[in-house]
Amino acid sequence: MTGSLLTRVTGDEKHLPSANSTYDVLWVLYDRILRITPETADAPDRDRFLLSKGHGPAAYYAVLAAKGFFPPAWLDGIGTRMNHLGGHPDRVLVPGVEVGTGSLGHGLGLGVGTALGLRAQGFLDTRVFVLLGDAELDEGSNHEAIAYAAATTLPMTAIVIDNQSASHGWLGGIAARFIGWTTSIVDGRDHDAIELALANRDRDRPHVVVATVEKKEY
């Protein structure tokens, strides 16, 4: 369903290869994991999803359209005048979007703040997920967010799309950068493996899922 909607996306073709890397993870999240629907999009105890990967909104839009957050016709002409769907998600204009993102490296810090706020309000069963690209892990703000989440034992989940966009000179690989986090490494196209990894939660530690995919044209 999502793949067919992604093919009708127009106006953002240059970022379709990046979006192609993410749509399987996004579909599993919204179809099997997240406790959120168009009817509960404003519920205080809803699960939260934040897209930090700035070049992957087309797949995000396709999933939201497939799940009924807005009409599929909106997918025609992303980023064009009079279209609600911009080159980066806008929480004011797009139903289902939690935060406006786009500047690489900001999403994980926003996710940490969201998780802290939910815990302070007593929403201990509400989950927070943040989707990142591998290259943005070089941003210093992500190192700070990773360390803070581990030190404060935040029960949140980061998902890193490993599509070989980064230099990969990191000792021990991507998962090793998340010190103090529990980790899973999965095939980013295997829906059952993705579901199993995302369903894993530790109330006393954050969790990172590294989804490996091949970046290619859609």
Image: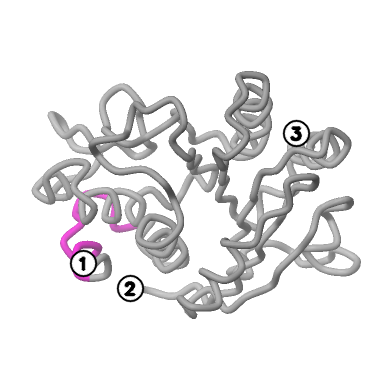
Please name the residue shown 62% across and 75% down the image: 186
| Residue bounds of the magenta highlight | 4-14
Picture residue at 36% right of the left edge, 51% below the top: 60
**Which structural element holds mark 3?**
helix
Q: Which mark is residue 141?
A: 3
The amino acid type found where label 2 is placed reads Tyr
Q: Determine which of the numbered discs, if any, sits on residue 30 in the image.
A: none
- Mark 3 or mark 2, which is nearer to you? 3
Amino acid carrying mark 3 in the image: Ser
Instruction: Answer above or below: position of 186 versus 90.
Output: below
Q: Determine which residue is flagged by label 1.
A: 7
- For the residues labelled 3 and 2, say whether their Cβ atoms are less than 8 Å apart: no
Q: Which mark is residue 218?
A: 2
In the rendered image of this protein, does residue 129 appear above or below residue 44? below
Q: Where does the C terminus fall, quadrant-wise?
A: bottom left
Of callouts 1 and 2, the N-terminal one: 1
